[in-house]
Amino acid sequence: MTLLDRLASPLRDGDSLTLHITRHGAATDVLLTAAIKGQTIDHDDAAVRQLVVALTAPLLVTVPQGESLGDALGAALEGIAPARGAARKALEERVIALQDATVGAKSSAVPAKSPKAKAAAATSVPVAPVVEGDANEEAPAATPAASPDTPTAPAGVPTLFD
């Protein structure tokens, strides 16, 4: 397999790889940068961001004059190939899991009531509880439930509502 084939083989549809070769005196720098289609470091999920950063990290290989650029770059690629493969697989699995979670959340949302159910709920009359005792005796007032607007205080600290 040629060096260019080795560079292109891990790319998926829409991914890109940029190769910069720069001579610096007696050495040559080879810089590889990658971009993954549809994935950026601005993703909402921290795990996806970390994997994208790892997969798009630049690779810089400095080759002394007289040595083969192809051999040096090939050796560097062989060294990182297992980690890149594992990271790419983890990214794909994470993206699928996030998509499945989104679909699952949408399908488990509470369905809207049918028009018949809404009408039945609107016409039903609440039944008062039966209280034993003197019929002339007033029932104690119910304590209102806390609402989101009811302030709370740490334990032991009185509030206006105590």
Image: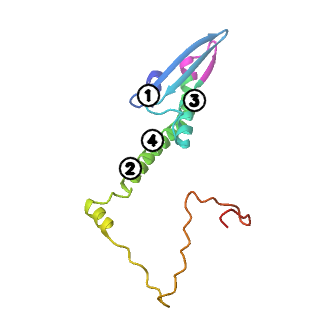
Q: What element carries label 3?
A: loop
Closest to the camera, between mark 2 and mark 4, is 2
In this view, 55 is above or below 104:
above
Please give left or right for residue 108 compared with residue 36 in the image: left
Mark 1 or 4 closer to N-term? 1
Give the residues drawn in magenta, as a range: 60-72
> Which residue is found at the position 39% from the left and 56% from the top?
109
- Tell me the distance, in whole angstroms, between the alpha carbons under discs 3 and 2: 31 Å
**Residue that carries the numbered disc 3 in the rendered image:** 57
Does residue 96 belong to the magenta stretch?
A: no
Mark 4 or 3 closer to N-term? 3
- Residue type at numbered disc 3: Ala
- Residue type at numbered disc 4: Glu
Residue 8, how many percent across, how many down?
44, 26
Mark 2 or 4 closer to N-term? 4
Q: Identify which residue, 60 or 143, lies in the foreground.
A: 143
Closest to the camera, between mark 2 and mark 1, is 2
Q: Identify which residue, 161 or 74, lies in the foreground.
A: 161
Please give left or right for residue 159 compared with residue 142 in the image: right
Residue 106, how many percent across, how many down?
38, 51
Check residue 92 in the rendering and tell me which mark sits there, or answer none: 4
**Residue that carries the numbered disc 2 in the rendered image:** 103
Quadrant where the C terminus is found in the figure: bottom right
Quadrant where the N terminus is found in the figure: top left
Q: How crowded is mark 1: few (under 14 residues within 10 Å), some or many (20 or more)?
A: some
Q: What element carries label 1?
A: loop
Q: Are marks 4 and 3 in contact (CB under 8 Å)?
A: no
Quadrant in the picture for residue 73? top right
Closest to the camera, between mark 3 and mark 2, is 2
Check residue 15 in the rendering and tell me which mark sits there, or answer none: 1
Mark 2 or 1 closer to N-term? 1
